[in-house]
Image (cartoon, rainbow, N blue to C red):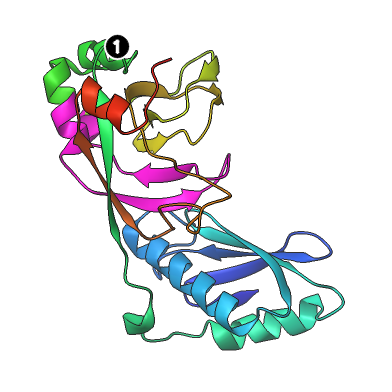
Amino acid sequence: MKINDSIHLELAGENALILYFSDNEQTTAVITPEISSKVEQAEQLIRQNLSAEIVDLIPSYASILVVFNLLEIDHHHLRNELKKLLKPHDHSNSRASKLIELPAYYSLESGVDLARIAKHAKLSVEQVIDLHQGQEYRVYAIGFAPGFAYLGEVDKRIAMPRLATPRLKVPKGAVAIADRQTAVYPAESPGGWNIIALCPLDMFNAQAEQIMPVAVGDRVKFFAIDKQQYLELGGKLP
């Protein structure tokens, strides 16, 4: 079902719908800041206007999974509500994105894949670090684990495929690259991304007033710190 020129909807279960976003000229969605902005704004509108009917919203790069309460609304009525709510509208009311600066301890000690990335890119380790911390990244989605923010896009010169064999343990705070995405692991977990640094800050804390420091649509910039600063900020070495 077409919601508007850039959004279409499909069933995703007896109590779920999924909204797919694309540019007007495209039939399939791609990852762009413009589409991410549409996803972010649509999520806000749904939360603000359908909170009684919605159980959960799960935004991604170019889609939103809408899980709803069958006791409050059915597929048919929810589709109609979404169509009214998501008609073309003024983007000026969208939430202002925040710039979050994250410290990162870049080194061969803390970034076990730094040397391999530098060799692959035919760059020095220092150049890889400079490229990674030299730009802002948009938060495109949060998933895989609570607080795991998918950030894009890294400079294509340091883009790296995922590891062929994922590690059984990636340390909490690992700053890593997969393809043209970068992220900070919010907790120790298995993972196949390429580790280039460690961040001492919590990316997810269920007891904190602000559970996660970032939200979809925010901007993230990394800045280099040394080992002593990393330890003073609460970081731990694996």
Residue where numbered disc 1 is placed: 109
Query: Would you call the spot at circle 1 few (<14 residues within 10 Å), some (14-19), or many (20 or more)?
Result: some
Tell me, yes or no, whether the highlighted magenta stretch contains residue 134. Answer: yes
Residue 127, percent from left and from top = 12, 23
Q: Nearer the viewer, residue 60 or 199?
A: 199
Relative vertical location of residue 87 with respect to residue 211 in this rendering, above or below: below
Find residue 135 and report its image quarter. top left
Tell me, yes or no, whether the highlighted magenta stretch contains residue 125. Answer: no
Relative vertical location of residue 30 with respect to residue 173 in this rendering, above or below: below
> Magenta span covers which residues?
129-157
Q: Quadrant of the N terminus?
A: bottom right
Q: Residue at x 50, y 14 (%)?
A: 164
Q: Residue at x 54, y 26 (%)?
A: 188
Residue 196, percent from left and from top = 31, 22
Three-letter code for the amino acid on which mark 1 is drawn: Glu
Relative vertical location of residue 196 with respect to residue 145 in this rendering, above or below: above
Q: Nearer the viewer, residue 184 or 2?
A: 184
Q: Nearer the viewer, residue 63 or 187?
A: 187
